[in-house]
Image: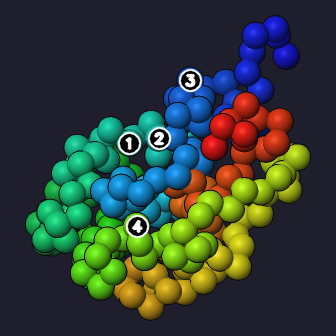
Amino acid sequence: MAPGMKQRCKWAGTDLLYIKYHDNEWGIPLHDDRKLFELLILEGMQAGLSWITILKKRQSYRKAFNNFDVEQIATYDSNKIVQLLSNKGIIRNRLKIEAAVQNARAFLSVQKEFGNFDTYIWRFIGGKPIKNAWKTQKEIPSKTDESIAISIDLKKRGFKFAGPTICYAFMQAVGMVNDHTVDCFRYDKI
């Protein structure tokens, strides 16, 4: 590594968009319901694709999905879904788009029951981030007991595209777990 270069998690690579996401968002504890909803939806959209694909389309998703305003998305009807299916700026997958609408409705139900989604989701880990100590990216699991429990509960509440692997990626993104490798400059900062 060149002098003055920061050591990052290997997955951040050299793509500037990935590096910015890694350095400024990934793994930082997040408690804002709108942002939690956005990442939950985007993680579901990512299923079967690379995260960089979604990151490159993130601004288009924000525009297409009313900046992830959960109340507006919950009202989307079949006409709006058809409109979204013609939007070349997003992944045009009917099941994923319909899931986003269903998830908005389920999200509102969770907010009503718990006061906010933040309280609901963080209770699965006792409200405090899990700090792992992975030396290599290969050690990092794709799912954990916690992500399995979250997945089961989300599905019971009507959420779609919320399997254990998607839930673990969500947990990583919103800082419920610190999965920066120990040699990454972000590891001790979070």
Where residue 169 sits in the image (x, y, percent)? 60, 60
Label of residue 118 in the image = 4
Secondary element at image label 2 = helix
Alpha carbon of mark 4 to alpha carbon of mark 2: how far? 23 Å
Alpha carbon of mark 2 to alpha carbon of mark 3: how far? 11 Å
For label 1, count other residues whose C-alpha is less than 10 Å away and answer few (under 14), some (14-19) or many (20+): some
Residue found at x 30% / y 41%: 60
Q: Are marks 1 and 4 in contact (CB under 8 Å)?
A: no
> Which quadrant is home to the N terminus?
top right
Q: Are marks 3 and 4 in contact (CB under 8 Å)?
A: no
Alpha carbon of mark 1 to alpha carbon of mark 4: how far? 22 Å
Of labels 1 and 4, the one closer to you: 4
Q: Earlier in the sequence, mark 3 or mark 4?
A: 3
For label 4, count other residues whose C-alpha is less than 10 Å away and answer few (under 14), some (14-19) or many (20+): some
Reading the image, the residue beneath label 1 is 58
Residue found at x 79% / y 44%: 181
Secondary element at image label 3 = helix
